Image: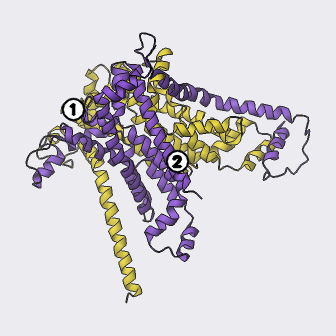
Chain colours: A yellow, B purple
Amino acid sequence: MPTVRTVKLAWRVKRIALYLFVAALVSFTALPIVYMVSTAFKPLDELFLYPPRFFVQKPTLRNFFDLLTATDASIVPFTRYIFNSVFVSAAIVAGTLAICSLGAYVLSKYRLPGANALFAVIISALMFTPQVTQIPTYMVISGLGMLDTYWSLVLPKLAVAYNIFLMKQFIDQIPDALLEAAHIDGASEWRIFWRIVMPVCRPAWATLIIFSFIGNWNDYFTPLVFTTSESMKTLPLALQTLAGGPGVVARSGAVAAGTLLVTLPPILIFLAFQKMVIHTMAYSGIKS
Amino acid sequence: MQSGIHAAETSRQRTAPEPALPRPKRGTLQIKPRWKKLLTGYAFLSPFLVLFIVFTVVPVLDSIRLSFTYYNMLEPARFIGLANYRILFLDDDIFFKAIQNTFIFSLVTGPVSYMLSFLLAWIINQLRGKSLFAFAFYVPSITSSIALSVVWLYIFSGDRYGLLNHWLIDWGIVSEPVLWVDDAKTILPVVIVVSLWMSMGTGFLVFLAGLQNVPKELYEAGAIDGVGSKFQELWYITVPFMKPQMLFGAVNAIVASFGVFDIAVAMAGMPSPNYAGHTIISHLYDYAFIRFELGYASAIAVVLFVLTFGLGRIAMKLFSSKDE
């Protein structure tokens, strides 16, 4: 007969097994990242060791110096790619945040004629990959004479269906009474948006900033299509050129350092905002 | 003026609190502020609207139009009816290969990543230290696939220096190094493994958040009604409650798996050996931005659009029909 004790024991054993299982999975998913970090600090002789070694023995910063200085000899210094990536990602994030929050506020609270139809279109736009529209977008950008400029990398990325969807779902939760109270106090529309709506949905725009930043920081397709000159390339493209595609072992150290440099910002940003993100994501279900 | 807006609002919103003071100047300005409010609304919405129309709505329609033409950007587009689609489906063996690859890829990564995301979210939601676990599972999805491909290419490197080959040879599983990313047979499986590794993304976070919002009382009520095991709880209480999140996750998984491109290119190159890593997007990119046959490429885009959109709609039907 199971006593309270044995039941408790069985429960505890199950629990520990579960933890072990999850921990094993975590170490599996973490493996490539740990390897990447470790490799970035490997001196040259350790990079080409046989048998290959997972962890670094004598860590060095040499690879980072190589990345920033040795590549100076090529046409464009590596710092230029870093600047491009930072600038483009930051511009998109700032732009899309402003545009999509304003739009979402109107869609959610103004009951404009046509707003429901627009929202239906936005929901539909969630359902296809952005590459589908790349050809006409390319023609528009080309027609505006913006090919190979920052504009081409930023402008098409501002009105993103997902972003306005996320903001609207969150703003829907704000009670109308709160906004009306502000009206009575004589606040202007702009002021209500800026002083009430935006502070209340801070978790939502924190999420938007993170997702938008990460997505655009890692974006490979857009710069591949819209940029032609070396000085306009962003980090993922530059890194691929540096690595030379599959099979090339040259500049392994610099590539390893570059890989770490490209991967780190998204991770750090997510780490900083994790709590807010999970809070916001609760609202991003699609109610049909 | 404000009181006018307020009046317009209260007529729709019964729950709004009544102002403590008598409203001054009511009536005289009632119509104009509503009109003005609409104008402000459209003004606030217009930046999004303009950009959304120019870069999303019009391009979709324009893709459809172009798909019926021959167009190379130099000469004006020439209408050729269904010729692009005919060639695409009947004569283009490489497109057939691309469709095949994309479908195999999607049929594996879509459902597997979806279920894995949900299952893992469900498991770690019951553990202590869940934010740490969540972070660990989520991080791969926010790394640049191009950057991480450097690491994966090392792991799957075709010589003895490759980590996986080294281990396999060490353990005596294989005697010769396997040419993981050079052999047409293993390219797609490798791309699938790497994608699965990266797939605990937005969907995973949405599930995790949704799970945290299932009211505790539901589980208590369920226990009284005779819900016994954890899995019954999952099926009868958690899943029905999380429908909106499940739908979002499904749409997300479909779109992501059919849009596969970066990883395939980074792992297998372009063109890949024997087109073993060729996807619909690779094909689109090839015809649009290398050969500049934009009409033909648009037909590819339209096929992809119809595919993801159709599947998204099906997902919506599936998740709403069970509702109530």
- Please provide percent x and percent y for residue A227: 39, 21
User: Which one is nearer the viewer's eye here, A85 or A119?
Assistant: A119
| Numbered marks: total | 2
Residue at horizontal 18 percent and vertical 36 percent from the top: B182
- Please provide percent x and percent y for residue B59: 51, 25
Residue at horizontal 56 percent and vertical 29 percent from the top: B52
Point out the image quarter for the N terminus of chain A: bottom left
Task: Give the Cα separation between the discs numbered 1 and 2.
Answer: 37 Å
Residue at horizontal 52 percent and vertical 52 percent from the top: B319
Residue at the bottom extreme?
A: A1
The secondary structure type at the circle numbered 2 is helix
Instruction: Evaluate whether residue A207 shows in this view.
Output: yes
Residue at horizontal 63 percent and vertical 42 percent from the top: A198
Lower sequence index among marks 1 and 2: 1
Q: Chain of mark 1?
A: B
User: Which one is nearer the viewer's eye here, B60 or A182?
Assistant: B60
How many other residues sit within 10 Å of disc 2, few (<14), some (14-19) or many (≥20)?
many
Q: Which residue is mark 1?
A: B274
Q: Is residue B42 left or right of residue A148?
A: right
